[in-house]
Amino acid sequence: MSKRLNLTLSVWRQAGPSAPGSFMTYHAKNIPDDASFLEMLDIVNEELIETGEVPIEFPHDCREGICGTCGVMINGRAHGQEKGTAACQLHMRKFSDGDTIVIEPWRARAFPIVRDLVVDRSPLDKIVAAGGYVSAPTGTAQDANETPIPKEVADSAMDAAACIGCGACVAACPNSAAQLFTSAKLWHLNSLPQGQAERFRRTEHMVETMEQFFGSCTNHGECTEACPKEISQDFIAYMNRDYIKSQIVNRKLAGQK
């Protein structure tokens, strides 16, 4: 049988991008400890609606730790205190009866607030649009084993592809840098055979698009700590290496035209 919690919530409320915002206090009563963090917010919102108040806007979609839509600062930490856990997978049993929980949106200049806890994370989409795909014609589908790929390479690509693009790395970084996100999106393509044809063009375009919106990496390491998929900082090193190479390769290719 689940336990019940009574909690005090300090939630950031903001009616719109240009509206002033402030923390509002709410009492979350009789919350099952087997509820997820987002389900707890659902319960609070139902009570607000019943009393004629405006419900709290918060980002969510699949609620399975896959889509990357959810993401809030919980007691000053991206996605909360549980390492390797998205906000939608954080359960209320990790809190104690009587706790005060501070909930606020991602805090980064590149992520302007839309309303309450919802932010605009479209700059991440622009990085992917700049080159996070394979456009080289590859013909019909090949047999799975036609192009042998070492297991170590396949594993590394899968580790990078685990990034769900939630933006926690940006929110946790003191510089609001997006190197972890960008490097993960790059490496899962750059490490595989089908990504080689556009490897250096892809790297240059994505890194330079990233730099238009986000700060620079100074190796604090907060990005990996906040990442719900525990993406490794090694990918940042791979990205930096490929970016340096891209300046040489792309310059040579431009001279041949």
Image (cartoon, rainbow, N blue to C red):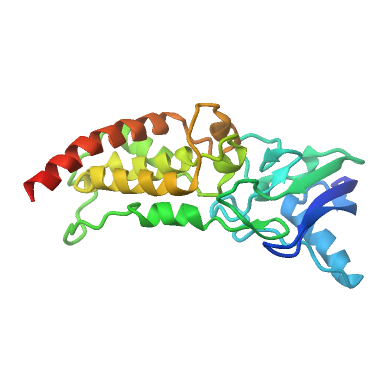
Rendered view: 235 above or below 71: above
Viewer-nearest residue: 200 or 28: 200
Residue drawn at x 36%, y 45% as measured from the top left: 208
Residue drawn at x 20%, y 40% as measured from the top left: 148
Residue drawn at x 29%, y 47% as measured from the top left: 202
Q: Is residue 36 visible?
A: no
Viewer-nearest residue: 204 or 27: 204
Q: Is residue 230 left or right of residue 139?
A: right
Q: Position of residue 246 (x, y in %)?
A: 24, 38
Q: Position of residue 38 (x, y in %)?
A: 72, 54
Q: Position of residue 126 (x, y in %)?
A: 43, 56
Q: Position of residue 57 (x, y in %)?
A: 73, 62
Tell me the quarter of the picture where residue 241 sits: top left
Q: Is residue 162 visible?
A: yes
Q: Is residue 149 left or right of residue 212?
A: left
Residue drawn at x 59%, y 59% as measured from the top left: 62
Q: Is residue 194 left or right of residue 58?
A: left
Tell me the quarter of the picture where residue 59 sits: bottom right
User: As drawn, which residue projects farthest toward the left?
Assistant: 256
Number of numbered labels in the structure image: 0
